[in-house]
Amino acid sequence: MIHGEIHLHVRQYINGRWETSATTGVSANPSDTSEVVAEYARADRRQAEAAIRAATEAFPHWSHSTPQRRADVLDRIGAELLARKDELGLLLAREEGKTLPEAVAEVARAGQIFKFFAGEAIRGGAGGGGGENVASVRAGVQVDVTREPVGVVGLITPWNSPFVIPAWKIAPALAHGNSVVFKPAELVPACGWVLAEIISRAALPAGAFNLVMGSGREVGQALVDSALVDALSFTGSVANGERILQIAAARRAKVQLETGGKNALVVLADADLDRAVDCAVQGAYFSAGQRCTASSRLIVEAPVHDAFVAKLRQRLKALKIGHALERGIDIGPVADEERLAQNLAWVGIAREEGAEHVWGGEALERATRGHYMSPALFLAKPSHRIAREEVFGPLACVLRADDYDEALALCNDTPFGLCAGICTNSLKHAMHFRRHAVVGMTMVNLPTAGVDFHVPFGGRKGSGYGPREQGRHAAEFYTTVKTGYMLA
Ligand code: NAD
């Protein structure tokens, strides 16, 4: 049981052992910066390389484990996450700043993901079900197509969803028989550690799962550079993703990137306006807008533009921003001082470019010293930087469209392509939008943020690269296909 008020001392998990490092770092509570959440060992390149070697040595053993064994391991991890969701949600809210209900829901979802992949280990995992027996075009020959684990996978994750993003990489990696080196983001070491601690008690062979906490430049880069790492799954910024892709592709490692978003929510004149405002508030501002699926572009058809903006402004005025553990809070702080400064700089850029300010965008003071800001709304032009670049904070802009065709064109006029939503009562427009929005995920009369755990997640264009994550499709990345021919 992790108590809220005591800070944790967390270490690396390498080859089945807990290790200290030469240097340490701390994570602080973004709702109250006087509170240290964890003091953590900061791995160096040497430790990252030791973790990679351990994973390499464990691979033959783990990759030949039975589907039942893998299912049991994953089921145990999932069950513990679900049983401890309130306690671990508290830790997540303290370290990352999500409100407590959001944080508890995230831990529960991480548990459900492990449970889902426990089933996948048997249903469709490497060595499990899901292979194909195919008739050969030649007489007397039998053909089968099977899936095998890829090898050692390096998993590099961002700070904004420190349970669920690691879960949706670690669970399929292990389910399909790969060994893992996991590097969480530096802002959230305690969340990474607690997940590793649960995994460490789930009867995996030593080295099949390793945790290395440290900087992206040193520890993350060691995973990217190592010839022993067969596949890299990265979620984070576009710039880092592109760098990783170039290096990893040059040595022919398998790469999967989930990078930024500039997701649109289209509101047509026939929409239920209250529902549309609800979708906008949840999608753009909850979790302080720090979600890759946040709807940061609200594209509104001209006849309802002014009414939508007025209603949204009223809702933003009523939102409660405060300490992530306070009851009744809608939005917690942003993750750290640097993000707050960046968000405020974006507000400045929006004003300088001539976007019309509607609401918010100011730093707020609360009883505790934290990184609080009011949700910001601007009326923008498609050429404005706040309408084109990812902010990753509680800032959205409204773009006016004359009709559905212009709304769809604006929606697709972006270098990103993660998800897009539409609020409408027209089946014709909903169906057309689902087909023509150039994204990985579409939403009709739902917020752009908030997805199921058993179906593919991911985007197109600047938002993603490689096969999708989650659900059965995760097998595309975490396995490799083998075709076997035999004379009957
Ligand atoms: P980031 O790119 O700064 O860091 C992500 C991870 O990469 C961290 O663990 C970091 O330490 C590591 N890293 C940094 N440099 C590295 C290097 N040279 N080699 C290897 N690893 C390195 O991103 P962030 O600020 O932590 O996260 C915010 C970004 O993540 C946003 O752009 C957001 O859109 C994106 N994101 C995307 C999704 C998605 O699924 N599409 C989900 C959540 C967040």
Image: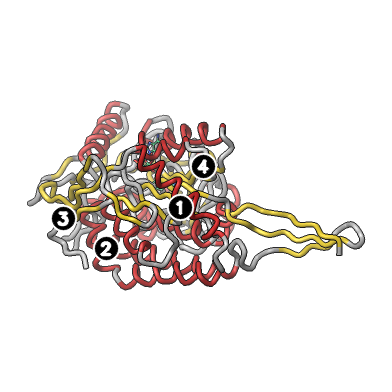
Tag of residue 228: 4
Tell which of 36 and 100 is nearer to you. 36
Mark 4 residue type: Leu
Residue 162: horizontal and vertical position, in percent? 33, 53
- Check disc 1 and report its element: helix, strand or loop: strand
Tell which of 341 and 280 is nearer to you. 341
Residue for point 64% across, 58% down: 147
**Dot 4 beta carbon under 8 Å from ligand 1:** no
The residue carrying mark 2 is: 89
Q: CA distance from mark 1 to mark 2?
A: 24 Å
Residue for point 57% across, 51% down: 150
Residue 135: horizontal and vertical position, in percent? 83, 63
Q: CA distance from mark 3 to mark 1?
A: 27 Å
Q: CA distance from mark 2 to mark 4?
A: 35 Å
Circle 2 Cα neighbour tier, 10 Å, few/some/many (<14 / 14–19 / ≥20): many
**Dot 2 beta carbon under 8 Å from ligand 1:** no
Does label 1 or label 2 sit earlier along the sequence? Answer: 2
Q: Nearer the viewer, mark 2 or mark 4?
A: 4
The residue carrying mark 1 is: 180
The residue carrying mark 3 is: 7
Instruction: Classify the position of the C terminus by image quarter.
Output: bottom right
